[in-house]
Image: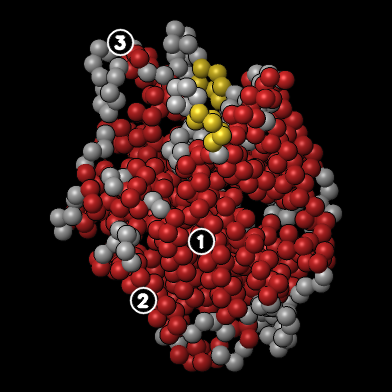
Amino acid sequence: MENNSGTFKPYISAKDFIPEFTPKAIILGSIFGIIFGAATVYLGLKVGLTVSASIPIAVLAISVFKKLGKATILENNIVQTIGSAGESVAAGVVFTIPALLFLPGGTNYFEYMQIFVLALVGGILGVLFMIPLRRSLIVKEHGKLPFPEGTACADVLIAGEKGGKLAQKVYYGLGIAFLYKLFMLIFGFWKDVPKYTFSRKSDLPNGTLMGEISPELLGVGYIIGPKIAGIMVAGGVLSWLVLIPLITLIGDNLTNVFSPASKLISEMSAQEIWSNYIRYIGAGAVTFGGIITLIKSFPTIINAFKDSFKDLKDKKSQVQTEKSRTEKDIPLIYVLIGSIALIVLIAIIPNIPANLLSAVMIVVFGFFFVTVSSRIVGLIGSSANPISGMTIATLMATSLIFVAVGWTGDVYQPIVLVVGSMVCIASANAGATSQDLKTGYIVGASPVKQQLGLIIGVVASAFVIGGTVILLNDSLTIGSNQLPAPQATLMATVIKGLLSQNLPWALVIIGVGIAAVIELCGVRSLPFAVGAYLPLSVSTPIFLGGLIKFTVDKIRKNKESESDIGPGALLSTGLIAGGALTGILYAVLKGWTVGELPDGTLVSVIDKIHEFTHSIIPEAGDLISLLIFFGLGAILFKFALSKEKNKSNN
């Protein structure tokens, strides 16, 4: 809001002091941070994508406080600020740290305490590094940088009196997703991955159609929209309906083993061809897509640094900020001391693969990409933030420096990953931090209290993120079809390829070429590359969600897509959270063994439940499973077409 003089006027005046950083806001925010952090771990390991949690947390906070008693808009803002830190830190963790499982000696560091420390340090660094940028990005660029999620979240908070009705859609989504996955995964009434593979003698040998019919993937597709969902599934179609049949057709006539496989192509299934060949092509495509996205952001990067350093030199401005509640940040001296202390901690703590050089690179690359991330999300939002591209660039630069000093042994691979993981976590959390500070700027929050809240959110979520990652690996195995961990496996591939020189470079370069062709066609190559890298089962349900979004917008004849607080978007948020949390419950029951077969196979609680349910009702076939999933899509479609009675007029 602008006053008559053209100066921005927040919803709550800087002169007004109302409850904000209260115990109930801190506790509820921490709870939401833990819940959405755990859900993001599952979603990130499964699909390699995450979605912003600020808006659903703001909606839920308003609803919860209405039940418990009144709360101020600034208390609700603190809840979403603390809670959103859990989602962003979890995203950075699952994109990188599971790569330890695929590096020589990396499993020695894949323990709860190590993951906790890396999540904690990386998340806090993201907050601290962003603090000096707040005035230049949030205040001076107000009206120029839209910060879409931050602005939408402020709209939700300002429309707080309608919060209970808004939250109803999220709760519906949670309940629907829970019941759906309860019957599908835990009771096993229908298949979770309907699949059809063409025979080797057909005109499309080994071509595969499949879809993981889960509510969280449907919700992701609706939120990211038809364009990105369509580009993503196109990559999957290329891999599973073009490249795999092509390799099968040619390979069936070869009598030699083609590296990096250890057996003839004629003996391979479609899954084995993907594992041995396609994923390297996909890795090359994702690497190119990430880097080209980063290159496109160079003008933004340069401008961000110019403005940031200019602001740091403005001593007079720094003094003025002390006079206003809405302009007071954590003092820079504390930012500097805290950052140094955290970096030293990483360098000296036992059983963390790091050294002095890697600590220096964490500082250099970390501050650089925190600036990049904070600026980019202001332009295009958190969901489109090229965190993977920044991380790949960090890994490549670190690896090349290590090669230059002669550090090429296997022991250095986990050290390179730690540098990349710190930068990834810090950049992801910095993006979320800037969105939250934008929300606070609009509603009239105290920046210093938001910054303290973000640190609390990092600490609270870090406790559960490590345990969730280890639980999922122990029960479902990270890197398997159930949890492919696409981002983490890609990071491991980049590190091993640069340090140990054991990559099948021909396949990687083919992937680079494919992504370059897509980019030259005027299409964003990164989502296409991610689709090519993942199993087709992941991108098909995402595409259905995007298709529903497209159809809804066409029926409504919307010139712009549905708002972030529209009924379809809110229900999709609930589907994502409910599906991910039920997936974690499934992992707990899958890892809970209750017996052992004569051949040594362990029997889990899930196995026992399936044995009982299938003795009564046999598992539904592929067609019925698909029809049930289409029914879920129909529910989303119906909700999305309902009138947005709760939409803010502000």
Q: Amino acid at mark 2?
A: Ile
Along the horizontal axis of the image, is 202 left or right of 246? right
Give the mark nearer the N terminus: 2 vs 1: 2
Q: Residue furthest top?
A: 201
Which residue position holds label 2? 340
Name the residue rendered at 48%, 19% in the picture.
Answer: 207
Q: Amino acid at mark 1?
A: Ala
Give the quarter of the figure containing the N terminus. Answer: bottom right
Work out whether residue 240 or residue 217 is closer to the camera in this orientation and state it.
Answer: 217
Which residue position holds label 1? 462
The local secondary structure at tag 1 comes to helix
Indicate the position of residue 231 as horizontal and vertical percent values: 53, 38
Name the residue rendered at 34%, 42% in the picture.
Answer: 102
Along the horizontal axis of the image, is 11 left or right of 257? right
- How many C-alpha atoms fall within 10 Å of the one at disc 1: few (<14), some, or many (≥20)? many
Separation of residues labelled 2 and 3 (CA atoms): 60 Å
User: Which one is in front in this view, the residue at disc 1 or the one at disc 3?
Assistant: 1
Residue 395's disc number: none
The local secondary structure at tag 3 comes to loop
Separation of residues labelled 2 and 1 (CA atoms): 20 Å
Total number of numbered labels?
3
- How many C-alpha atoms fall within 10 Å of the one at disc 2: few (<14), some, or many (≥20)? some
Work out whether residue 303 or residue 166 is closer to the camera in this orientation and state it.
Answer: 166
Q: Amino acid at mark 3?
A: Asn
The local secondary structure at tag 2 comes to helix
Residue 253's disc number: 3
Give the mark nearer the N terminus: 1 vs 3: 3
